[in-house]
Amino acid sequence: MAQPVFLIIEATPNPSEMEALKAYQSQTPPLAKKYGAIPVANYDVQAVLFGGTQPGVFSVLSFPSRAAIDGLFSDPAYQELIPTRDLGFTDLKFYVVNERL
């Protein structure tokens, strides 16, 4: 059985663009599910102990493969959401990771 691949999202919402944030957040879960995404966890960041600025949240999604993650990001419906996404966050990073065995 193939090991899942995880998408970790580091996000800082833009407080002056809450409508864009809500629109993006309401439309991405069905798209992610289409590619086999399973939400694992959401974390509010309490503090940054060393380096960098404090993001708002970390989210972890499990996907069946790297190809599934690539499919999500290349999906035309997701591509249409990018301008809304970029308004809704002041900082946003995506990390593709897998468990070390």
Image (cartoon, grey):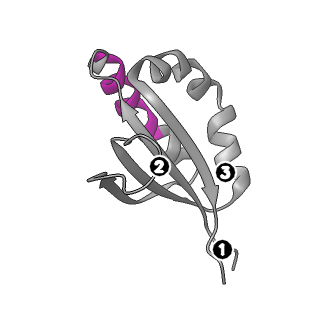
Q: What number is the disc on residue 3?
A: 1
Q: Tell me the SS state at disc 3.
A: helix
Residue at point 67%, 51% (across, down) = 68
Single out the residue that lies furthest toward the front: 50
Label 3 vs label 2, nearer the camera: 2
Q: What number is the disc on residue 19?
A: none
What segment carries the magenta color?
19-30
Closer to us: 76 or 54: 54
Closer to the N terminus: mark 1 or mark 2? 1
Q: Name the spot of residue 95 as percent of width and height, x first.
A: 60, 50
The image quadrant that residue 82 belongs to is top right
Q: Tell me the SS state at disc 2.
A: loop
How packed is label 1: few (under 14 Cα within 10 Å), some, or many (20 or more)? few
- The answer to whether residue 28 is magenta is yes
How packed is label 2: few (under 14 Cα within 10 Å), some, or many (20 or more)? few
Tell me the residue that label 3 is attached to.
68
Q: Main secondary structure of the magenta part?
A: helix
Closer to the N terminus: mark 3 or mark 2? 2
Residue at point 32%, 55% (across, down) = 43
Q: Name the spot of residue 81 as percent of width and height, x first.
A: 52, 22
For badge 2, the amino acid type reads Gly
